Image (cartoon, grey):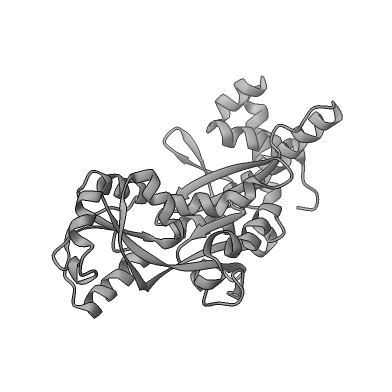
Amino acid sequence: MERLNYQHLYYFWHVAKEGSVTRACEKLHLAQPTISGQLAVFEQAIGEKLFYKEGKKLVLTDTGRMVFNYAEDIFALGRELNNMLKGRLGERGLRFNVGIADALPKLMSHRLLEPALNLGEAVKIICVEDKAERLLAEIMLHGMDMVLSDVPATLAAGTRVFNHLLGECGVAVFAAPSLAAYYIDDFPRSLNGAPLLLPTTNTALRRSLDQWFDMEDICPDIKAEIEDSALLKTFAAAETGLFVAPTAVAGEIQRQYGVQMVGRIDNVRERFYAITAQRKIKHPAVMAILEQAQTRLFGLLDMPVTKAAKDADLS
């Protein structure tokens, strides 16, 4: 494929967005043989299939998803150029696709993304929450500029993926005021038999907590295991049990959910990573997050590393 045919790309892009050739034809006011024929020529030029059928719907292959993500950027730039030439403000601003691992606390996600919102230029953030491994697959297909996660990417994610340690902090136990008053004395021994709301066992925090419980010979009464961090805190605000969260956002947690801190567990640390592909490392929003995470959120005193945004090349 020596030169990209943008007309073919345009037809493909519409078919991918609509999910069928028929709906794309209606949108473009073209006959179905025209679209089908041009799509076949485009696939032949690329040398790979872009769709497979799932019932009556066309579903993108891995190659198709990668081509579609590029097409989104290409035609968004075209719309912006058209607007600029007409003297109008670009409708999309700087596009920033970020994936957030579902194990990451929502308040932490917001705080980490704040620098991107305070850039000198307009930024349109597209946030997707999912399992970390699925989000990392999107990075490899160029669908994400960055993934925020509580665990680093491993070699299985690919050789051109970079981990950037944003920072780390201790954790604390929180509870509704009535429960906090009962368990604050003799902490952490008071956690023995205490009603606890914990993240699910597939999270880094849960694994660290289980090790700490074993080390301290503490056996809490686990009332629930909840994957979504916001839902877990909602349960806690209703006096269902105590929960654990990062100290870096302790103030926000107490204000938003009306809970109190019972005590700190400084031997358990939570780490936070920005994961990028090398191709995207110069994105202004990514750079702002990497540069400001340590000073804005974690602080030098709570950081045992000398450089918060230290790259770890997995190649």
Report whether residue 49 is seen: no
Residue plotted at (46% across, 56% down): 134
Q: How many marks?
A: 0
Q: Position of residue 174 (x, y in %)?
A: 30, 57
Q: Is residue 160 left or right of residue 177?
A: right
Q: Is residue 117 left or right of residue 176?
A: right
Residue plotted at (65% across, 62% down): 291
145 lies above or below 87: below
Q: Nearer the viewer, residue 298 or 165?
A: 298
- Using the rendered view, name the quadrant where residue 287 is placed: bottom right
Report whether residue 286 is seen: yes
| Quadrant (top left, top right, bottom left, bottom right) of the C terminus | bottom right
Q: Position of residue 131 (x, y in %)?
A: 42, 55
Q: Is residue 244 left or right of residue 156?
A: left
131 lies above or below 40: below
Outermost residue on the bottom side: it is 215
58 lies above or below 215: above
Q: Nearer the viewer, residue 173 or 196?
A: 173
Q: Nearer the viewer, residue 129 or 8?
A: 129
Q: Position of residue 103 (x, y in %)?
A: 39, 57
139 lies above or below 31: below
Q: Position of residue 206 (x, y in %)?
A: 31, 65
Residue plotted at (62% across, 22% down): 27
